[in-house]
Amino acid sequence: MAGIYIHIPFCRHKCSYCNFFSVVSQKHRTEIVPAILQEIDARKNAINEKVETIYFGGGTPSLLSVNEVEQLIDKLFASFEIINQPEITFEANPDDVNPEYLKSLKQLGINRISIGIQSFREEDLNYLERTHNASRISNVMSAIVGAGFKHINADLIYGIPGQQNEAIHYNVSRLLDYPLDHISAYALTVEPGTKLNHQISKNKKPDIEESAITQHFYQLSDFLLAHGFEHYEISNFALPGCYSKHNTSYWYQKPYLGLGPSAHSYDGNSRWWNISSVSGYVKGVNEGKIPLEKEVLSLEQKFNEFIMLRLRTQQGIDMQEVARLFGPSWHNDLRKAFKSVENTQYIRWQNNRIVLTRKGFWFSDGIAAQLFRG
Ligand code: SF4
């Protein structure tokens, strides 16, 4: 089974912390959908498996008109073998959506909405330079529920300077006022090149505090577990049976095709990513050659990615799968490497799997590095 990701690279405004590829200029706004439709034609043989999930991400997909979304969905169904009732997720900003728009998306077959709430506190939204305000959220959530969506994810950001334990409790308990079945909670990070990085370096905004972030991670997890959610991946919580199928396929290294500027693809052996430029992408499509970079993965790279991605999940590393995919010798090496990092507080052996404890989730990158080859 495979997934398709469509990247819509426009935003009304650039949030201070954002390092996703998106532009505020609307110069090529009307050209993007025709270009992606052409890219679909060019890539229709890129995946040989049935498509199980479709994901509209960005940027801001909710800047597309209903007609543009319909053109993209129709083209995907005409070009790929897609299972009955695939999971189709659509990222939306609280600013852009209204009841009619949401109902139209539902009628097009979109069955999962991911809404970028981030916080219910005005001071947090101001720090992040989000364009919506907290009072808008309840109208938007009513509209999503009113349109008939049963699968709703909300994005939340924690670790914003000024947040105390009460703020985390307030944000996460306000989320549960709504019938969400999935919550993605991300620690704020200050990425090089972002406006936030510049603001902090010039002392125009307070810096993040690592120790508070770690504590808030555990606080969030405790709260959501107590309310019936599973902490099934470091940054993701879901009610039982409501995991994001699309994101899960990334962690399980299933093939996916990314369409649009900067979109990444993976076919099981190699990875490629389209140029991160809207004009370069549109020009490339029109000339019949989209600029991209490609990397063929060695077995060692695949193994290290396998370790890193599986450790992010509640299921951890299945040792039988390691033996099947990488052979008995690498399986035995991993077993030995595990012995050297074994620590019941952070990582343990459980039913022939290596799993991180909830505490260990926070240290997953460092622990994974100790299990890598090479
Ligand atoms: S809306 Fe999302 S993609 Fe756009 S600038 Fe803000 S964080 Fe980045």
Image (spheres, rainbow, N blue to C red):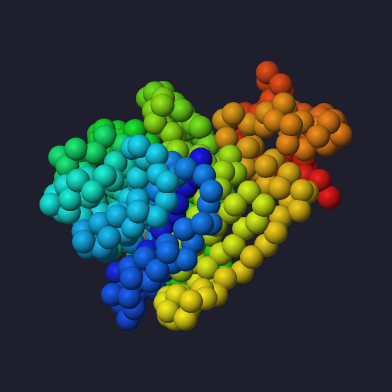
- Image-quadrant location for residue 147: top left
In screen coordinates, is 169 left or right of 330?
Answer: left
Residue beneath the point at 78% across and 49% down = 300
Q: Is residue 281 above or below residue 79?
A: below
In screen coordinates, is 276 left or right of 298?
Answer: left
Question: Which of 148 and 234 lies nearest the eye of the viewer?
Answer: 148
Question: Which of 322 and 175 lies nearest the eye of the viewer?
Answer: 322
- Image-quadrant location for residue 317: top right
> In x, y percent, where is residue 217?
50, 39
Question: Which of 309 and 65 lies nearest the eye of the viewer?
Answer: 65
Q: Is residue 83 visible?
A: yes
Q: Is residue 348 visible?
A: no
Residue beneath the point at 15% across and 40% down = 146
Residue beneath the point at 46% across and 28% down = 230
> In x, y percent, where is residue 236?
47, 39
- Image-quadrant location for residue 171: top left
